[in-house]
Amino acid sequence: MTSSGSASIHFTSSTEGSGQSHKHRTRLRNIYKQARQEFKHFSRLGPTSSVTEEGYKNTLASISSLKSQKRLTRELGKERRALLQRLAELEGSTVRSTKRSYFEVRKDEGFLRPEISTRNSELFDHWTKSTDDSRRHAWTTEDWAYQNGKITEECNKSKRTNAILRDDIRTLRSIISQCHPYASTIDIESTSNPASLTPDTSFPGTHDGQTSSRELLARMRAKGAQRRERRASQNISL
């Protein structure tokens, strides 16, 4: 507890091995819980400035949106992994090789790949270095705008990632259904919420539908064959 009586910053720690130092991770749900508790506490104490009130409300809304996008990323990522694994089985290849071939073909076609996520510790650096008292009495409009701007930017990054994942899922399902028609329907059935696969046209770099699934798979097979030839050549030279 701080001098103002609100909850202190919470971190979830994990220990790697006995006697090892703790690794602290900043979790979205803990920051959200802390911000909500602080806002409720300050509201009970009496009138709060419009800057503080708006700042907390915007922060809570931004974190909530980011949590939803991150949750969707995990769901879509899980489905894409399952489809890549099934395609690898149908092709008699490894998941690693199939995944590499797929990403190489997509890259050759100029399609975007997901951006690297910002660590929560960096995303909330301004927040975790402050106190509940300073956020209530010292943070200006610029402070809140800076923090919420970083959250919004990360949320948009997650939306772009999800748009790419949706496109990958549609593409892989198409490859399996068109190039391996004997595969059972469960292999290409979406496990995600149908709404999560709705195309997001606000972000560029997704599939335009011009390249056929058969052509994509042919290119993937060629990529795999090229790698095998290179490895064989290297082994001979050794």
Image (cartoon, helix red, strand yellow):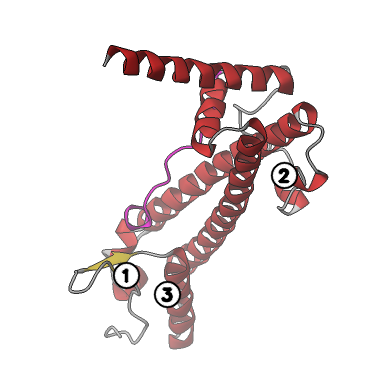
Q: Which residue is mark 3?
A: 34
* Residue at the (73%, 17%) spot, across then down: 210
* Quadrant for the C terminus in the image: top left
Secondary structure under the numbered disc 3 in the rendered image: helix
Quick check: 32 above or below 226? below
Residue 212 occupies which quadrant of the picture?
Answer: top right
Disc 2 + disc 1, Cβ < 8 Å: no
Label 2 crowding class (10 Å Cα cut-off): few <14, some 14-19, many 20+? some
Image coordinates of residue 14 in percent, x first then y, are 32, 70
The answer to whether residue 119 is magenta is yes
Q: Can residue 56 be seen by looking at this rendering? A: yes
| Nearer to us in this view, 130 or 74 | 74
Q: Earlier in the sequence, mark 2 or mark 3?
A: 3
* Quadrant for the N terminus in the image: bottom left
| Mark 3 vs mark 1, CA separation in Å | 20 Å
The magenta stretch spans which residues?
110-123
| Mark 2 vs mark 1, CA separation in Å | 34 Å
* Residue at the (54%, 54%) spot, across then down: 70
Q: Which residue is mark 1?
A: 14
Q: Which residue is mark 2?
A: 197
* Residue at the (42%, 78%) spot, across then down: 38
| Amino acid tagged 1 | Ser
Q: Earlier in the sequence, mark 2 or mark 1?
A: 1
Foreground: disc 2 or disc 3:
2
Image coordinates of residue 226 in percent, x first then y, are 48, 15
| Nearer to us in this view, 60 or 168 | 168
Foreground: disc 3 or disc 1:
1
| Nearer to us in this view, 73 or 100 | 100
Secondary structure under the numbered disc 1 in the rendered image: strand
Q: Can residue 201 be seen by looking at this rendering? A: no
Image coordinates of residue 143 in percent, x first then y, are 35, 56
